[in-house]
Amino acid sequence: MNTSIEIPVVMLDEKPVSITGCRHHFPLLHEQVNGKPLVYLDNAATSQKPQVVIDTMMRYYQSENSNIHRGVHYLSERATQAYEKARDKVREFLNAAYREEIIYVRGTTEGINLVAQSYGRTNVKDGDEVLISAMEHHSNIVPWQMLCEEKGATLRVIPMNDAGELLLDEYEKLLTAKTRIVAVSHVSNALGTVNPIKHMIALAHQKGIPVLVDGAQAVPHMNVDVRDLECDFYIFSSHKVFGPTGVGVVYGRKRMLEAMPPYQGGGDMIKSVTFEKTIYNDLPYKFEAGTPNIAGGLGLGAAIDYVQKLDLKAIGEYEHDLLVYATEKLLVIPGLRLIGTAKEKAAVLSFVIEGIHPHDIGTILDAEGIAIRTGHHCAQPVMQRFGVPATARASFAFYNTKEEVDALVKAIYKVKEILG
Amino acid sequence: MSLLRELYQETILDHNKSPRNFRKMDNATRKVEGYNPLCGDHYTIYVKLDGEVITDVAFDGAGCAISKASASVMTSMLKGKTKMDAERLFRDFHKLVKGELDSTDELDRFGKLAAFAGVSEFPARVKCASLAWHTLHAALESKDGSGTSVTTE
């Protein structure tokens, strides 16, 4: 068994730092829970925040707070500049071609709703089909279901195998002349599967079908290049990538976004308004009605600066080693079954233990200071596919350590001792 | 650890492992499904009534240790009781798991239900403990032969 994990060293502000040494940047990781040091393994639900993100948001409220885009005064100018600069950081982070392609939203859920309501309602008609996959989060199911119901369209689902990998042959068959859009996750939140989205996008494009990628679980773990992927929409949430909650991003190809009607009406998304006619604003503002989450945008910018300094490639490799180590350790526990055993996986371990409900596992682990998620992970169809009511899920970030995996394993034996 | 032991008491572990009255009932007067979407706990409670008296009660389904033990203990206490007795027990149980006992309440008064007092320290688990009772309540309120369902959301 692999018992040692190489901890990569990255350059941070021109100083070498080991990746796990970066734990010190995250104040919450040093808290105690139930009298035990916190072992935070619920990163797929939300990540912890480095001090630099917290400081950025606090500084905004303490010395820059004002509304953006309309003020002529000093503070408003400054806040506008900072907010727009964060947009440039997001553009660079995703390697999008134009800053106009980066639209701020509240999170991945709102982003998918934006595309479903704006692109979907314009392009999906009676008898058409929308194609999603069997491993989607509810946020990439329900908006499409609502659209299909309204339009008389049909929701089609790419099936997966017992390992939690999409069946690409079936996928190809499901791409038909009726398909108006494919909406698929980059990484599954419940299973950890990394989908071959570049290939899937290419297949859809051969038939002229646009593809939306739910990137919520991918961006904290890997470099995402929307031009390399050639996706039409890529959506993620700030809070999963060490930024604040309440802000997320829709990347959309410029020519698609230009052709789409606004999602919400209100201030900021207009050029001029009369009672007879409103002229909409240019991209990206056309999709950004109302005062946005300014502090959130700045916090996201700080988070992106942070992870880019750390090097997402090194992060991905380290997390993979952690995943391999944890998988080996968990698989020797009698009665434990992993849900999601794809060849390509992000650092997510969903599991069940024979005769013990995940909720009880979660409670006992919590008493040991270990935070995991239990339940259906907003992916009830995934639970139905694997015939389980729920799973326990440990999900890792780069700041997690081998010792924390050991603590998890030890606590699972305790669960078995109490309830086995 | 002591809080955990308070939660997972012997009575609860025992009823989780060997649930009482854990069966389908074909000739039930009332049958109601209870579902906790948060954790996927899912039970059906069957009640046979003779007028106001519960002559038989059973359950089946799946869920966590707390929800299953709660359903099992509940069914083991209800045979021969009236609907009004059952509602009184439900109120007692609710007080226990919410930690809302009166200063004069003695734990002994609650009999087997006292095993669930530890749940009050785990607010996330109150729904698990209460699911069977809410479902029973719906069964007793429903019309004969009806198959309604309740959720704890």
Image (cartoon, coloured by chain):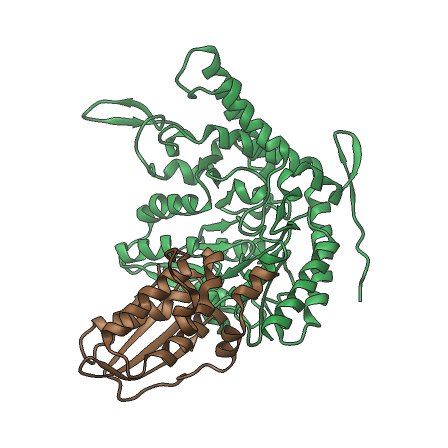
Chain colours: A green, B brown
From the viewer's perspective, is residue A259 above or below residue A140? above
Residue A132: % across, % down: 44, 59
Is B29 placed left or right of A398 in the picture?
left
In the rendered image, the quadrant that contains the C terminus of chain A is: bottom right
- Toward which corner of the image does residue A30 lie, by quadrant? top right
Is A7 placed left or right of B140 in the picture?
right
In the rendered image, the quadrant that contains the N terminus of chain A is: bottom right
Is A333 placed left or right of B20 in the picture?
right
Q: Residue at x 42, y 11 (%)?
A: A72
Report if residue A366 is visible in the image: yes
Q: Residue at x 62, y 68 (%)?
A: A415
Residue A13: % across, % down: 74, 29
From the viewer's perspective, is residue B115 above or below residue A131? below
From the viewer's perspective, is residue B136 above or below residue A191? below
Specify the farthest residue to the top.
Answer: A73
Q: Residue at x 23, y 82 (%)?
A: B53
Specify the farthest residue to the front.
Answer: B104
Query: For this rendering, which residue is in front, A340 or A209?
Result: A340
Specify the farthest residue to the bottom.
Answer: B27
Query: For this rendering, which residue is in front, A405 or A216?
Result: A405
Query: For this rendering, which residue is in front, B72 or A105?
Result: B72
